Image (spheres, rainbow, N blue to C red):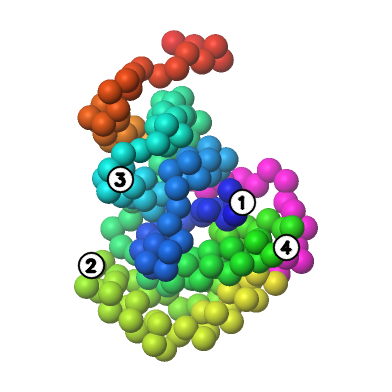
Amino acid sequence: MSPTLTLKLKTGIFINDAVERGSIMSIEKIVEQALQDGYLTPSMEAEVGRICNTASELSIEEYMALDRLMGALLTGEVVVLPRKQFINVMEELVLSDVIARVAEIEAAREVTLDVGDIAAYALNRLPPLYATTEEGAHFQRAKAKEQLQDLISAQVNEAIARNLDRPDTPNPTALGKSSGNEVLSQLTTWLQANATNFDPQPQYNPNISS
């Protein structure tokens, strides 16, 4: 699976449904995507926290990936998109469908698809389903899966077809960015508690002046 597939997101959304369906990302893939895009979405942040909190022991590769992420947050190479006070449940349903379909296509063909662009195209043609509580989100998920699943699948398929036919756009402009201090602090605290040889000081970068 390509790095683009893991999380080429352009909105800070939750991916509960994708995780339930088995589309669980590794820390290394999340960090790789964050470094590529220049931002960390709330869903990516939440998934890193979930892995750290549930894993009995992280691998050396995972520790190194977290260290890279912390360094990027310190230098501003990666920033954190703000959390929202509400969610559009349609976003997570579309995203989970897109991730599953793109995984199948990229496994069978020598192509790289843009998950964010595909999801955005489909979402622009589907009704929003907003919720401000977990109970409300659960209700909206059940309603959408019962009444709108065929429509969601149709729009995702159309979006994928258009993405396959579209030429690549060089150097796309990323969406708005915000501070990563909170995530940096959380990662530092977790690593200090779980990695005996962890040094919270950033690695020296000759291109960054003090």
Residue 70 is situated, as x and y percent measured from the top left of the image, at 40, 29
Please check the rendered image and state whether residue 163 is part of the magenta-colored stretch, yes or no: yes
CB under 8 Å between discs 2 and 1: no
Q: Circle 2 is placed at which residue position?
A: 133
Residue 119 position within the rendered picture, expressed as x and y whole percent measured from the top left: 55, 66
- What span is colored magenta in the figure? 162-176
Task: Identify the disc placed on residue 111.
Answer: none
User: For the residue labelled by badge 4, is the local secondary structure a helix, a strand or a loop?
Assistant: loop
Q: Counting other residues with Cα less than 10 Å from the Cα at mark 4, is it few (<14), some (14-19), or many (20 or more)?
A: few
Comes first in the chain, label 3 or label 2: 3
Left/right placement of residue 156 relative to residue 42 reads right
Q: CA distance from mark 2 to mark 1?
A: 33 Å
Can you tell which of label 2 and label 4 is closer to the viewer?
Answer: 4
Q: Main secondary structure of the magenta part?
A: loop
Are discs 4 and 1 less than 8 Å apart at CB?
no
Q: Which residue is under mark 3?
A: 55
Give the label, 3 or 1, closer to the camera.
3
Binning the other alpha carbons within 10 Å of mark 3 as few (below 14), some (14 to 19) or many (20 upward) gives few
**Mark 3 or mark 1, earlier in chain:** 1
Q: What is the three-letter code of the residue carrying label 3?
A: Ala
In front: mark 2 or mark 1?
Answer: 1
Asked if the stretch drawn in magenta spans residue 175, the answer is: yes
Q: Which residue is mark 1?
A: 2
